[in-house]
């Protein structure tokens, strides 16, 4: 009988932990900013403004990641899979054309794009 109670308690804990994850509260995945969420903002013109208002943590500087390559810790921006520069490049992207903005941390960015991406990548995907 105690085993049955023990399993019931473990099941309840497992369900509770899943519902309290990073997506709890209906805000969606924190590493992705979709067009429908961006369109809820009034008066913004650029992708930078959207990120600054909705996901400011994307823009946080993470420090130098390499002694041999001082720029490796800087955040880089990719537009439809093509590198276009640093964070300032987001000022040139009209928010009305954005389909999604995704943040990759340094580890994931280095895996996808290679070395010198330790500061992370912001991937912007434009709608067609």
Image (tube, grey):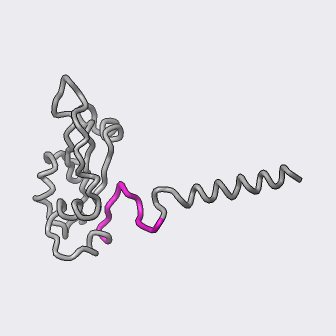
Q: Residue drawn at (32%, 39%), measured in percent from left and top? A: 112
Q: Residue drawn at (17%, 71%), measured in percent from left and top? A: 44
Residue extending farthest to the top is 68
Q: Residue drawn at (78%, 51%), measured in percent from left and top? A: 6
Q: Quadrant of the rendered structure where residue 124 is?
A: bottom left
Instruction: Find residue 93 and report its horizontal and vertical position in percent.
Output: 14, 60
Up the image or down, 82 lies above or below 67; here it is below
Instruction: Find residue 38 and report its horizontal and vertical position in percent.
Output: 27, 69
Does 1 appear in magenta?
no
Q: Residue drawn at (76%, 56%), measured in percent from left and top? A: 8
Range of magenta residues: 25-36
The answer to whether 28 appears left or right of 64 in the picture is right
Q: Quadrant of the rendered structure where residue 27 is?
A: bottom left
Up the image or down, 105 lies above or below 58; here it is above
**Viewer-closest of 59 and 95:** 59
Instruction: Find residue 79 and report its horizontal and vertical position in percent.
Output: 20, 52
Instruction: Find residue 78 and report its horizontal and vertical position in percent.
Output: 21, 49
């Amino acid at each position: 009988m105690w085993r049955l109670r023990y399993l019931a308690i473990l099941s309840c804990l497992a369900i509770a932990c899943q519902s309290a994850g990073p997506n709890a509260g209906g805000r969606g995945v924190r590493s992705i900013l979709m067009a429908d969420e961006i369109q809820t903002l009034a008066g913004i013109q650029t992708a930078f403004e959207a990120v600054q208002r909705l996901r400011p943590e994307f823009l946080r500087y993470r420090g130098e990641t390499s002694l041999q390559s001082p720029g490796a810790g800087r955040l880089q921006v990719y537009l439809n899979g093509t590198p276009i520069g640093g964070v300032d490049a987001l000022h040139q992207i009209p928010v009305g054309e954005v389909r999604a903005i995704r943040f990759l941390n340094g580890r994931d960015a280095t895996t996808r794009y290679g070395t010198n991406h330790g500061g992370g990548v912001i991937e912007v995907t434009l709608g067609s």
